[in-house]
Image: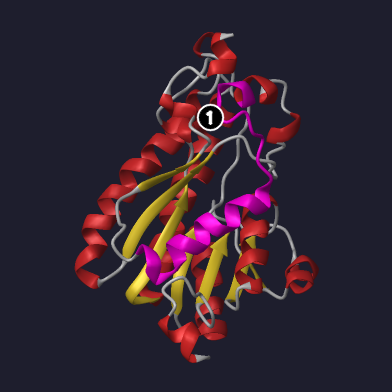
Amino acid sequence: MTTREKSDPFSVADRHIVIVGGTAGIGLAVAAHLVEAGAKVVITGRRDAAEVAAGIGAIFVRTDVTSTESVDAGFAEIAQVLGHVDCLILNAGVETAVGEIGDLDLEAFEQVLDVNTMGIVRSLAAGVGLLGRGGSVVVTSSPAGSITTPGLAAYSASKAALDMLVRTWALELGPRGVRVNAVLPGIVESEMGTESAPDAEIIRRMTATGVHRKAAEMGPVFHFLASDASASLTGSLVGAHDGIPAGYSAEVLE
């Protein structure tokens, strides 16, 4: 490591970073960005993605966030591979249609909560012991945690729960020198297929900027929270949503 890298608060060179849910979309794009920045990155997912990981210079460890046994086994393997973790990015999530309350798919509703909320809880519970003083936890949440639409109850509830968990975990882990923050992406191309959803254009019009982001554009946001440059941030919900919660955009009003 050069002297500049040692003194640069934005550097993540040689950092050990784990991305839970890192095999596609935002997670994979962030992984590629961090590898390029010099970090040693492990990505996890339910399906085999060893070739995908190798393609960006990362390491793959299989975990299914709906299974405590799988998550525990995955982090045991991560401990062997990395020894310790400097930054744990919790990105696993699904956006499954559940219907409205009069015609609700309860099984789908439970699946969304199990993956998006409990999957993150299981992952941090298994991985927190690998984080030392100066460590950073970054959770992928959503502006849907505070702004919702009909039919989005499960997804919005799961993200609202994460926002409160982030604040709680920040208080719990602060004395250990571990920071916990969330990133709230807006309309971003992802493994959920957001870019092709029927309401994608409507959501784009709701942004203050009118921009539909590429997944790679989230890389620098997560990079910042993984670095010492964000040392004073904990318990924060970092909006990377182009102003969706700010109010009515000019395009919507027109």
Based on the picture, tell me whether residue 206 belongs to the magenta stretch. yes
Q: Where is residue 7 in the image (x, y as percent from the top left)?
A: 41, 83
Residue 125 visible within the image: yes
Report the front residue among 213 and 132: 213
Residue depicted at 72% across the width and 27% down the height: 197
Q: Where is residue 207 in the image (x, y as percent from the top left)?
A: 55, 27
Residue depicted at 54% across the width and 36% down the height: 112
Based on the picture, tell me whether residue 214 belongs to the magenta stretch. yes
Position of 140 compared to 195: left or right? Answer: left
Outermost residue on the left side: it is: 175
Report the front residue among 81 and 186: 186
Position of 157 compared to 189: left or right? Answer: left
The span picked out in magenta is 204-230
Mark 1 belongs to which amino acid? Answer: Phe
Q: Position of residue 243 (x, y in %)?
A: 48, 32
Report the front residue among 247 and 183: 247
Residue depicted at 53% across the width and 15% down the height: 150
Q: How is the image coloured?
A: secondary structure
Residue 128 visible within the image: no
Q: Where is residue 166 in the image (x, y as percent from the top left)?
A: 34, 50
Q: What residue does disc 1 label?
A: 109
Residue 107 in which image quadrant: top right
**Majority secondary structure of magenta residues:** helix
Identify whether 189 is placed above or below 138. Answer: above
Could you tell me which quadrant the C terminus lies in? Answer: top right
Report the front residue among 30 and 220: 220
Residue 206 in which image quadrant: top right
Identify whether 252 is placed above or below 215. Answer: above
Outermost residue on the bottom side: it is: 2
